[in-house]
Amino acid sequence: MPLRQAATTAGLITGFAADALLGDPRRGHPVALFGTAAAALERRLWADSKPRGAGYAALCVGAATGLGVAAQAATRRRPFARFALTAAATWIVLGGRGLAAEGTEMARLLESGDVPGARKRLSHLCARDATGLDSAELARAATESIAENTSDAVVAPLFWGAVGGIPGLLGYRALNTLDAMVGYRSPRYARFGWASARADDVANLVPSRIGAVLTTVSAPLVGGRVRRAWRVWRRYGALHPSPNAGQVEAAFAGALDVRLGGTNSYGGRAERRGTLGEGRAPETADLRRAVRLSTVVGVAAAAAVAVTR
């Protein structure tokens, strides 16, 4: 293995370990700073226009990717610097520990009967309208968010880091952040956010399916069965309106033997997401299992990077 490639691989694994041990940086998180800058640029460029939105996405993602390209070029002949910058970038863009912490806190709130607190906390995981959701619906919403974000915040960054090094890490996180900011089908973003949302869909086509495969093979570690998880994934994964979220959500449903999907509300607009799985409705205990499954899938993804690069 060439030294630069070995440095990148070691950096990806070290960054994954840093996220698992330390979680997100507490102050001045670069992703948050990027979001602030992107929001400021949006205020200047916004128009109810797909071309304007595409230009906005290209500027934001291009800037992040360009920074990665510069870092990659600067460390071309400096393997230790390549390792260090790759590790730092990986730590910055991953969100596995934070995701697990939010899922665990949601489970704690539900176990203690603090439904109002859980409704408020759900916003840390997803943009779903939690008003009026009971404990069962909150458990379902959190489980679905854990599943989807296992792909978006762990598997996909590692995949693009393995494929593209530092530019892949930074470019993917920038695009995924834009999708979370403007990729909604609201009146304001239906056209302006179209390019960000579609580009994010394309970027996650392969990682989401890798995440689904890793979820199915990890099912026994949370009391599930590989065959059932595989069957549910293949049968229900394409029924979700998202080309990617449904893949890993269906795999989680099969691995946990629960039923996900249903009608969700976003900003007062109801969306029917279809039914994913054949088991019972998820309970709080299943949310804790989903957190464990997410952690296992993350470890499996890191191991796959170490083995295949």
Image (cartoon, rainbow, N blue to C red):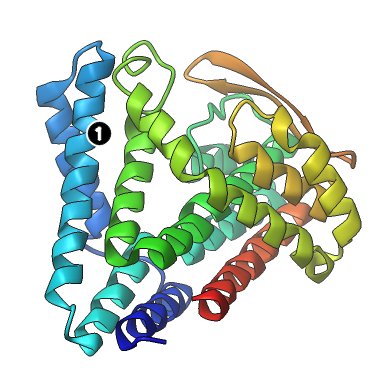
Q: Position of residue 234 (x, y in %)?
A: 79, 42
Query: Disc 1 residue type?
Result: Ala
Considering depth in this image, is 27 or 40 the residue closer to the camera? 40
Name, please, the residue furthest toward the front. Answer: 2
Q: Is residue 57 above or below residue 109?
A: above
Residue 301 quadrant: bottom right
Q: Position of residue 150 (x, y in %)?
A: 56, 55
Residue 88 quadrant: bottom left
Q: Is residue 282 visible?
A: no
Q: Report the side of 265 relative to 14 (left or right).
A: right
Residue at image point 51% right, 14% down: 268
Residue at image point 42% right, 72% down: 19
SS at circle 1: helix
Marks counted in the figure total: 1
Residue 219 quadrant: bottom right
Instruction: Report the quarter where the N terminus lies.
Output: bottom left
Residue at image point 58% right, 21% down: 265
Q: Report the side of 2 relative to 30 (left or right).
A: right
Q: Report the side of 103 relative to 79 (left or right).
A: right
Q: Position of residue 189 (x, y in %)?
A: 34, 18
Q: Is residue 305 visible?
A: yes
Estimate how packed mark 1 is, as few (under 14), some (14 to 19) or many (20 or more) residues with alpha carbons within 10 Å.
many
Q: Is residue 33 above or below residue 185?
A: below
Q: Is residue 82 above or below residue 187?
A: below
Q: Report the side of 143 relative to 22 (left or right).
A: right
Q: Dot 1 corresponds to which residue?
A: 57
Residue at image point 33% right, 43% down: 175
Q: Position of residue 285 (x, y in %)?
A: 78, 56
